[in-house]
Structure formats: structure tokens, C-alpha cells
Amino acid sequence: MRWIIRFFMFLVVVAGVAIVGLLMIPGEKIAQIAKEQFEAATGRPIEISADVSTTIWPVLGVRTGRVEIANAPWSDNGPMLAADELLVGVNALSLLSGNIDIRRIEAISPEVLLEVRSDGTPNWAFEGVAPSTGSGETSTSTGASIPAFTVGKGIVSSGGVRWLDHQTGTDVTLSNVNMELQLPSFEGEGSVHLEMSMNGVSQVLDAKIAEFGPFLNGAVSNLSADVSIGGSTAGFQGRGGWMPLALDGAVTADLDDMASVYKIAGQTPVSVPRGFGQAIAVKGNFTLTPEKTVHLRGATLTLDQNTFSGDVDVNIAGNRPNIQAQLSAGDLDFSSLAASEKEGGTPATGAAGGTGWSRDVIDASFLSTANARIGFAAQSIDLGTLKLGPTRASATLDNSRIEFDIAQIAAYQGNVSGNFVMNNRSGLSIGGNLNFAQLALQPALRDLAGYERLIGTADFQMRFLGVGNTMHAIMNSLSGGGSFAIGQGELRGLDLAGMLRNFDLSFEGEGKKTIFDSAGASFTMDGGVLRNDDLAFVADRIRADGAGVIGIGTQTLDYRVTPAVALGDGGITIPVIIEGTWADPKFRPDLQAIIDQNLAEEKAALEARLAEERAAAEARLEQERAELEARAAEKLEQELGVTREEGEDLEDTLRRGLENEAKDALRGLLGGN
């Protein structure tokens, strides 16, 4: 016990001697010694102002005035470091051996320039200084590295950092930099707490580096980090290096403040529809390569309410990220793609008074944020106006144009294939070429147009193109064409057979319906107007043909159906006009056509009667002519003494009688018998 007390007393005496010795040394001398030691260790000039004083509290050390460390000789951008004040605290006992063990170092308002020459040489590569030997000493071999040091606590307050890379053209400035560094051993673990601001966004970094010194000199080390960027956070656990920058490990990120992330990346924040990444969460195995490519394996990616899993590769070296991914998902909600009516606003109206499409501007600027090729499978997709089931498709985003290639989509009890395109390169356009097989019409038309009266399944092919920055403009510019074929189904709201049989409009309305066997047509679209002239509708004892226009942009109908109903051996045809809005269509018989049809029947009957009367008159005339000929023949026979032979015309009999009389007269003149 006495030996312990004596040893403790010895330490106190040594500390006292050290303090007295330190206080007896002038500040200028201390500055000169520090200057010589630093320049000898780094080969880099340092300027320390004459305003140097010794301190006892809170640590034994010195406080300087302005300090400047010269930049590399090849740079003309000012000093590598300039600080208003520098406070250095040391272990007093280490002074007896001539070593300086830094317990605390604090830089007040430092400005740091980290610069990389065009050939890749950094300005922190000090001339003639080799990597640490591991014992705290350095050698003077041809290599260059940061010399070994230890810091009980290093503090930076109100500082700034500029990163200037002449290789890549990067020029980044960090302001309001506050840092706390703890490095008990240069070769061991170091920890850093860093607060700073970049592009007006506050950031906080907490990092631990397992082999701090080698990491500073470019070696790869185990490390962990937690970062906050505005309201977004991220974490990393793995290995990495920074000469060049490379990381490999597990990553988590909750990017709830995407506006701050965009600002940090030097991009203008864009308005992204909900479901496409207003907030992003990422979890997976993360790799960042020196070639500026990012790889996620076994990743979970959440974009707002949508969650994907799979593998993602991102190249961030170009003007915009290039993304390659293969993802799978459960239920996806992209309903924000369909512009909604403004809350509390007045809906637009079509030309015929129907509820029109939204006039809210569709912001498609998010299409310019990246290039991508993504393959994905999902259990369901909600596109707002369309509800899709299990889906296998791919999406290619290239220079503000995205194309969805659909291999298979289960939709409305059927299947869909084809492609769908959104192009915002020079104004927004939407188009595609879609094929629907066995589509259930009632739910599909309800979602697309709010129309629920047609029930059945259909095969449907359609190509379309719409241009405009609102749904109203797009629907009023639709062009294209297609065809459809419907099997057995039902048309609600209209008892077509009853209306025709009874000529009664009461067969149209709630509770009425027409069951049909088939229906089909082809159509064209231009300027938001659909035209058709070959509708064929077949039901029990009914056939209907149709032609007309459907205003897709105005949500109106102007269509004429001509149904024919079989009644016994005959039938009846009453053309029906369908007009009005999609929400409230009106059905009425075409009275003018009915009138024209009845007049045509009466005309035909009159012509038939006239033909009969004409035939009867001609028969009577023929009979009278025959009777006259008979009486004439009888008289001729009496007067001329000639008998009419069978089949002989009256004219021939008359000629023969006259010839006989002439012969008799001639014989009398000649005196013959």
C-alpha cells in the first residue's frame, strides 16, 4: 500500500514540474516549436500568429491565434486549412519523455479545402511522409500518407469544408460544420459526430471506423454510420473506403424528406405522385463501387404505400440516375396517376351537360428524374381509373418517356396484354395498344366511365393516343380505333322487345332490361369522338344494327339503333335514338323514320292495287277485242263467203275473201265461168 501511495505522489510531483516548466516557456517559443515539428512531419508550411498563450484549464496546453496550413504546391486555391483559433491540450506527464500526447484539440471557425488534382493526387498527401508503422512513428519512404496521431477529443466549431475535385468537376461546399472526433489509437477505432449544412439542408453524421488511421490513408475498414438529411435518415453497417469511395454492407434508409435529398444532390425538388416516392424506404445489402454504381441485393423498397422486393442496380455517374431492377410486389396503388377533382371545386361539364373530365394539371415532371428499365410482378395494381389483378410487366423510362410492356394482367375477370406509354418529352401524351380477353364489362365500364348498364364479357382490341396536360385535354384529343365482340349479356334500363311490341316508352327505365346473344362492332376515334357504323346486336327474336358517335371528351351519346322484332310470320322495326350524357342517357323511338317506313308500306300497297286494276282492265280490253274480232269474222264470212280457218287471223281471212271476189270479178270481165 505504501508503494502505491509513493507512486501516486511521484505522479503529482512530475505533473507539477511539467506544468511549471510549460508556464515558463514563452508562447512565441511554443508556436515556433510547434511550427518546426509540423513542417518536419508533413513537409507543408504552417503559419501561426504570435498571439499564443498557455492554458491550464480545462486542459494543459496552448491557445493560438490565426493558423494557416499551406495547400499543396500545385494548387492556387488558398490554404488547405485556416482557423481563427486553435486550442491544443496535452498529457503533462508525456512532456517528461519529449512526446506530445494530444488530449484535446479544438479548431474555431476553420475553413478546410480538400482538393484533388486532375491526375487524382489529393492535397492531403503530404510530401515525403510515409504511412504509420503502427508504433506511432513514421518513416520517410517514398509513399505519402497522413501521419499517425491520437486525439482524446477533437472539436471543430463553426467551420466550413470545400470539396474540389478537378477530375470530376465536383465543387461542393459544406457550411456550419461542427465536429467531435475521438481517436484513442491511430490504428484503432475512431468515432466522429458531424453536423453540417449543404445546399441549405442540415445533416448529421455519426460514424465509427474500426481502423481509423488506415482508413484515412485509403485502406478499407469496418465501419458503421447513421446519417440524417433534413427529415430523412439512413444507416450503414459494413466495410468501406474513400480513396476511391466504395462501400459494401447492410443499409437502411427512411427518406421521408425527399425535397432535402433532391437539394443535397443538387437537383430541384420535383412533385412526385403518391405511390412513386414522395417518401422512400430502403433495406438490403448495399454496394457502392468506385465507378459510381449502386447495387441493392435482397432489397425491400417502399415508395409511399407501395412495397417492392428484389434487386436494384443504379448508375449515378451520368446526368441522371440509370436504374435497372427486377422487382416483385403485393398490392400496388398508383391511383394518383388519375387526376382528381379539386376538393370543393365545381366539376367541368360536357357539351350536353354531362360530368366532364378533370381539368387539373397532370404534373409528369417526375418522368425526367431518372432513366430506368424495371421488370416487375404484382398481385394487383390500382391505376385510379383502372383496377388490375396479378400482373407481369416491364417498364422502360428513357428521357421523360415511360413505356409499360404488359405480358399479362388479370383485369375484370379477364386478361390484358399490350403496351401503355406516357411521354412528357415535349408536352404530355398518353397512348397504347391494348388487347382485352374475356373482360367483364360492367365493372370495367363503371371504373372507366361510371356506366353500369351493360353486362357481359368482351374481347376488345384498341389502339389510342391522347395529348394534353389534363384529363380533359387528353380525352378530347383521343385518336385511334379498335373493335369488340361481346358474347351473351344484358342491357339494363331498356326492354327493347317490349318497347317495340307495345310502342311504349315505359319499357325504358329502372328495372327494365334486354338479354342478348351477341354484339360486336368496330370503331375509329378522332378528336375525342368515337364513330361506329357496323354495330350488330342479336337477341331472341330481335336483331339490331347501330351507327353513330360517342363523345369521349364530352361524355355524350348520339347513336341510332335500328332493331327488328319477329312477330309470328311478320315483324316490326322501330329505330331508336340514344342521346344525352353518359350519366343520364335518353332513349326514344325515331318517329320520323317510323313515319317514313309506314308511308313506304302504304305506297307499296297502292302500287300493288294499281297493278291489279291495270291487269284487270287489260284483261277486259283483251276480251272485248276478241269478241269484236269474232263478230267481224262472222260478218265477213256472210258477205265474202269465206270461212275463217283455225288459227287464221281475221286480217288473213279478209285478205283471202277479197282475193276470191277479185278473181270472180276478173273472170266475169273475161267472159269466163
Image (cartoon, helix red, strand yellow):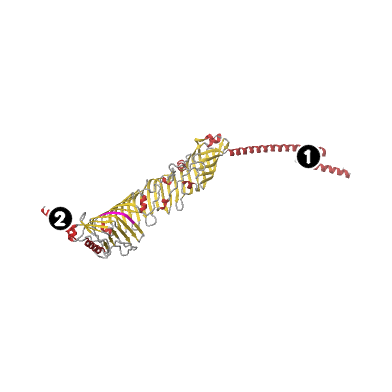
Amino acid found under the numbered disc labelled 1: Arg
How far across and how far down the image is residue 50, in percent? 25, 61
The part of the image, by quadrant, that contains residue 57 is: bottom left
Q: Earlier in the sequence, mark 2 or mark 1?
A: 2
> Which residue: 53% across, 36% down?
497
Amino acid found under the numbered disc labelled 2: Val
How far across and how far down the image is residue 35, in percent? 24, 62
Q: For the C terminus, give its image quadrant.
A: top right
How far across and how far down the image is residue 434, in percent? 46, 48
Res 8 seen here: yes
**Label 2 to label 1: alpha-carbon separation:** 178 Å
Disc 2 + disc 1, Cβ < 8 Å: no
How far across and how far down the image is residue 82, in percent? 29, 59
Q: Secondary structure at mark 2?
A: helix
* Residue assigned mark 2: 12
Q: Residues within 10 Å of mark 2 (few under 14, many from 20)?
A: few
The part of the image, by quadrant, that contains residue 59 is: bottom left
Q: Secondary structure at mark 1?
A: loop
86 or 561: nearer the viewer: 86
226 or 663: nearer the viewer: 226
Residue range (magenta): 173-181
Res 302 seen here: no
Q: Which mark is residue 548?
A: none
Q: Residue furthest left?
A: 2
Magenta stretch: includes residue 117? no
322 or 309: nearer the viewer: 322
> Which residue: 29% across, 60% down?
81
* Residue assigned mark 1: 644
Q: Residues within 10 Å of mark 1 (few under 14, many from 20)?
A: some
Q: Residue 423, relative to residue 617: is it above or below? A: below
